Image: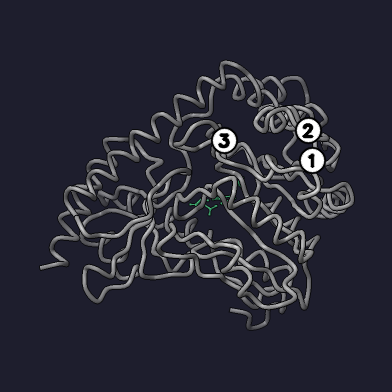
């Protein structure tokens, strides 16, 4: 699509996840009966405490530029929050940079750390925006196929097979699109491997709190300091607090990198939305909001169980990744015959009115992603439609 456009955009494609939600909205507006299980965003309203803090911030005139790196209230709240999630370890608020959503934090990190000639490893299937963001930094993404026997996760052995001289690795756990979660031992092994080879790790932990095991999912922050010298941790409020539209995310990075990322965004966005930062600060660490989070995660868990048991019961033999975190269910469609994920999703939305995301968006079109961040009744109705559609394919 680069005719007449800068080489900066030579690999650019519109985000497939965003495009599918837009397509579902368009069909609904045109009067079609479409259930959208494509979008990866919580369907719950933003909890009252942050919502009111945002309104108060606007009324109090917090409506001008904020510091590039974000307001101190939010950086301090984020540091305390991250510290508490990882057993009270020290987290320095000065190493946190707040951005307009963690998508911008990821962009800042990649643009700061990588450039022409750099190779960045991305365990695949992977969230659609990682390779795109690496390309925008003019570096080269290399997709490392995850092990199908191991929830499509990449091991140190898989990483060792990657091109020598790689500069970076982007790791997402809990994983979008698979729902897989890396264990503490796996994270430690990857961090050790990266430290030895001087590879920068961008650890996307945006789904850390949406975990169906005990407590938050294992994190790079659970590791000792000497394994974190080349780690940039990405998180934000979008998923945990149902705050996707507020656009607040943040990165925790070594001092020099944090400073560079703040300087970078001083020329792009001048920092994050100012009142939204107060809303995010109010969300972190408030007891009432904690209860909202527990309730939302509990709901996600119930919906996950509904999806898993329905697939087990009505589509036995269909392979899927055991979903341990996030709100995605990733299943394989090639057992239905000669059909790609893209064909499956195109036919499903046209014939049965359910929007899902083809695996092609994540690097493997034998699979399809279903997001269960939707009302339970819609999920049940969508499952009825998926089951009867899939059974017909098998006939
Ligand atoms: N990382 C992952 C893995 C995601 O799924 C998303 C979804 N939007 C993001 C980052 C970006 O989230 P946001 O910009 O809303 O913080
Ligand atoms: N991350 C979500 C998804 O994968 C939201 C859309 C996006 O930002 O890609 O569906």
SS type, badge 3 = loop
Give the residue drawn at x 21%, y 73%. 337
Q: Tell me which corner region of the image, top left, top right, bottom left or bottom right, holds residue 94.
A: top right
**Sequence-wise, which precedes: disc 1 or disc 3?**
1
Of 391 and 48, the residue lying toward us: 391
Which numbered marker is on residue 75?
2
- Looking at the rendered structure, the number of numbered marks drawn on it comes to 3
Q: Tell me which corner region of the image, top left, top right, bottom left or bottom right, holds residue 161.
A: bottom right
Residues at marks 1 and 2 touching, judged by CB atoms closer than 8 Å: yes
Q: Is residue 372 left or right of residue 115?
A: left
The answer to whether the beta carbon of the residue marked 2 is less than 8 Å from any atom of ligand 1 is: no
SS type, badge 1 = strand
Whether residue 298 is situated above or below residue 18 in the rendered picture: above
Single out the mark in the foreground, 1 or 3: 1
SS type, badge 2 = helix
The C terminus - image quarter:
bottom left
Single out the mark in the foreground, 3 or 2: 2
The answer to whether the beta carbon of the residue marked 3 is less than 8 Å from any atom of ligand 1 is: no
> Which residue matches tag 1?
96
> Which residue matches tag 3?
243
Q: Distance between the residues labelled 3 and 2?
A: 17 Å
Residues at marks 1 and 3 touching, judged by CB atoms closer than 8 Å: no
Whether residue 336 is situated above or below residue 254 in the rendered picture: below
Residues at marks 3 and 2 touching, judged by CB atoms closer than 8 Å: no
Q: Distance between the residues labelled 1 and 3?
A: 19 Å
Residue 348 position within the rendered picture, expressed as x and y whole percent measured from the top left: 26, 61
Q: Residue furthest top?
A: 288
Q: Few, some or many C-alpha atoms within 10 Å of disc 1 (few <14, some 14-19, many ≥20)?
A: many
Give the residue drawn at x 63%, y 83%. 3
Q: Which residue lies furthest to the left in this view?
A: 395
């Amino acid at each position: 699509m680069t005719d007449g456009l800068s080489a900066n955009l030579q690999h650019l494609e519109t985000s497939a996840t965003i495009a599918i939600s837009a397509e579902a909205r368009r069909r609904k507006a045109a009067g079609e009966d479409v259930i959208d299980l494509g979008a990866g965003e919580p369907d719950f309203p933003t909890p009252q405490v942050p919502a009111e803090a945002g309104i108060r911030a606007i009324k109090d005139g917090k409506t001008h530029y904020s510091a590039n790196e974000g307001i101190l209230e939010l950086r301090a709240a984020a540091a305390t929050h991250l510290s508490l999630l990882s057993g009270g370890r020290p987290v320095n608020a000065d190493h946190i940079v707040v951005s307009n959503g963690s998508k911008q934090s990821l962009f800042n990190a990649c643009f700061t750390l990588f450039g022409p000639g750099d190779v960045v490893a991305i365990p695949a299937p992977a969230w659609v925006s990682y390779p795109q963001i690496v390309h925008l930094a003019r570096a080269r993404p290399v997709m490392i196929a995850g092990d199908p026997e191991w929830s499509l996760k990449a091991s140190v052995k898989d990483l060792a097979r990657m091109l020598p001289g790689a500069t970076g690795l982007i790791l997402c756990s809990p994983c979008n699109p698979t729902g897989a979660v890396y264990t503490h031992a796996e994270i430690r092994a990857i961090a050790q491997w990266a430290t030895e080879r001087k590879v920068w790790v961008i650890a996307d932990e945006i789904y850390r709190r949406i975990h169906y095991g005990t407590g938050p999912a294992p994190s790079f922050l659970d590791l000792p300091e000497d394994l974190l010298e080349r780690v940039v941790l990405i998180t934000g409020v979008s998923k945990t607090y149902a705050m996707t539209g507020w656009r607040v995310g943040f990165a925790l990075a070594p001092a020099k990198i944090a400073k560079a990322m703040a300087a970078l965004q001083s020329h792009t966005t001048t920092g994050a939305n100012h009142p939204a930062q107060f809303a995010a600060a109010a969300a972190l660490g408030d007891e009432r909001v904690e209860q909202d989070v527990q309730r939302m995660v509990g709901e996600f868990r119930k919906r996950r169980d509904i999806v898993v048991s329905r697939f087990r019961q009505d589509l036995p033999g269909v392979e899927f990744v055991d979903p341990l975190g996030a709100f995605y269910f990733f299943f394989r469609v090639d057992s239905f015959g000669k059909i790609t994920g893209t064909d499956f999703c195109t036919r499903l939305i046209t014939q049965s009115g359910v929007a899902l995301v083809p695996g092609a968006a994540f690097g493997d079109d034998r699979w399809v992603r279903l997001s269960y961040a939707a009302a339970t009744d819609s999920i049940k109705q969508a499952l009825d439609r998926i089951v009867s559609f899939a059974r017909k394919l098998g006939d």
